[in-house]
Each structure stands twice: as structure tokens, then as C-alpha cells.
Amino acid sequence: MRMTGALALAFLSASGTATAADDATLARGRYLAVVAGCNDCHTAGFTTHGGKVPETAWFKGDTLGYAGPWGTTYAPNLRLTIARMDLPAWTAWARSVVLRPPMPYWSLNAMSDADLAALWHFTRSLGEPGPPAPTALPPGEEPPLPVFRLVMPAMPPGAPD
Ligand code: HEC
């Protein structure tokens, strides 16, 4: 893909980085979204449709709640998350962030700089972010449907986790 000078400049000022995303970087981000499982939760309907969701709907978050002892969490709209951060801020944050279940934050923490950059560029290339996912609910608050619920046995007092 060739960028016009004006487009490339707009891209550079939006990204705050010295290099514009090339096709290989975007392809790497797209690949990670699929093989690292990010779409499974951050794209509505991805798991229930065998991954057959058009890219125009990827990473917009989901209204499916994940309820458990941590309360109820929702996979956020990653287009909005990444729009809020420049690349250095995203890389530093993604390397150290700790999130609630079922987000596999350790996988995000373990990504290389190149992979985090590819995800950042790819996510920004997806277009209009759309609305945010619902806000997480505290433990004990009953979530609306749809909800994916972890049902645990009652533990005797003093039992280890
Ligand atoms: C099993 C479901 C699941 C998978 C798979 C998953 N996530 Fe998440 N993710 C979540 C949930 C739920 C949250 C919200 C956690 C919280 O509220 O603490 C979250 C939060 C996040 C956040 C924080 C967003 C914000 O605005 O606070 C980022 C970034 C993120 N995920 C990126 C990824 C990436 C990148 C991948 C692929 C490597 C991925 N996630 C895979 C469920 C998932």
C-alpha cells in the first residue's frame, strides 16, 4: 500500500512514532488477533460463529458478562483503549498491566515490542471505534444477561483457594 504524503503525515502525527505501519505490520497484528485469541472475547460473536465475524466488527468489545468471585467483567472495546494511548504508553502499560479474569493478561505482558506495536497499528487501522463495552460490576451485584458464569463449590471456612 502506498500512502500519499498528506496521509502519511497524518498517520505519523496520530501515532507519535517515527515509522508508519506497513502492510507486514498490519498483517502481523491481524494474525495475532486470531492466533493469540484476542478476538475470542474482544469481538462479539467470535466464539459462537467459529471466528466468522467480519473484520469491520473486530475488537469493539462485548456485552457478554463474565461473572465469578471477581464480580462481572466485560471484554472492553480495544479500539477505544488503543486510541487513548500513543505507542510508547501502550507498550509500557501492556507489559505490566494486571487485569481481572478471564483476561489472560500474562499473554499480553509477554508480547515482544514488535508484536505490541503490530497490535497497536492494526487496532488503529480498524476504523470507527464505536461505543464502549459495559462497565464491570462489583462482586455480589447480579449482572444482566447474557452472562458466562463460573460456578464454584462453597468452600469450608479457612480452606485454601
Ligand atoms: C477469555 C476472554 C479474553 C481473551 C481471550 C482476551 N481478553 Fe482481553 N480482556 C478480557 C476481559 C474480560 C477484560 C476486562 C478485564 C478487567 O475488567 O479487569 C479484558 C481486558 C483487556 C484489556 C484492557 C482494556 C482496557 O481498556 O482496560 C486489554 C488491552 C486486553 N484485554 C487485550 C487483549 C489482547 C491483546 C488479547 C489477546 C492476546 C486479549 N485481550 C484476550 C477478556 C479477554
Image: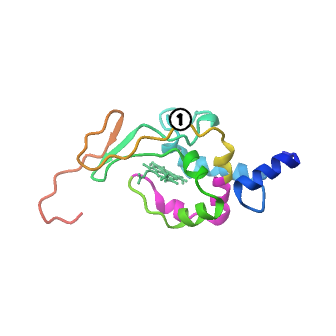
Question: Is residue 21 at all visible to an observer of this figure?
Answer: no
Task: State the residue at coordinates (48%, 44%).
Answer: 41
What colour scheme does the image use?
Answer: rainbow
Query: Residue 116, relative to residue 11: is it above or below?
Result: below
Examine the structure image and report whether residue 118 is included in the region drawn in magenta. Answer: yes
Residue 16 visible in rendering: yes
| Residue 5 as seen in the image, left or right of residue 56 | right
Which quadrant would the C terminus be assigned to in this image?
bottom left
Rendered residue at 76%/51% (across/down): 11
Q: Residue at x 52, y 64 (%)?
A: 109
The residue nearer to you, when weighing 40 against 98, is 98
Magenta region, residue range? 102-120
Residue 94 point in image, percent of width and height: 54, 62
Q: Residue furthest left?
A: 157
Does the beta carbon of the residue at mark 1 sit less than 8 Å from ligand 1? no
Please name the residue that numbered disc 1 is placed on: 50
Instruction: Give the side of residue 108 with respect to residue 32, left or right.
Output: left
In terms of secondary structure, where does tag 1 sit?
loop
Check if residue 131 falls in the magenta segment.
Answer: no
* Residue type of the residue flagged with mark 1: Gly
**Residue 99: where, in percent of width, then height?**
42, 58
Which of 82 and 1 lies nearest the eye of the viewer? 82
Residue at 56% in and 46% down: 80
Q: Quadrant of the N terminus?
A: top right
Q: Position of residue 61 (x, y in %)?
A: 50, 41
Residue 2 in percent (x, y) is at: 87, 46
The answer to which image quadrant residue 56 occupies is top right
Magenta span: predominant SS is helix
Q: How many marks?
A: 1
Q: Residues within 10 Å of mark 1 (few under 14, many from 20)?
A: few
**Figure check: 144 above or below 92:** above
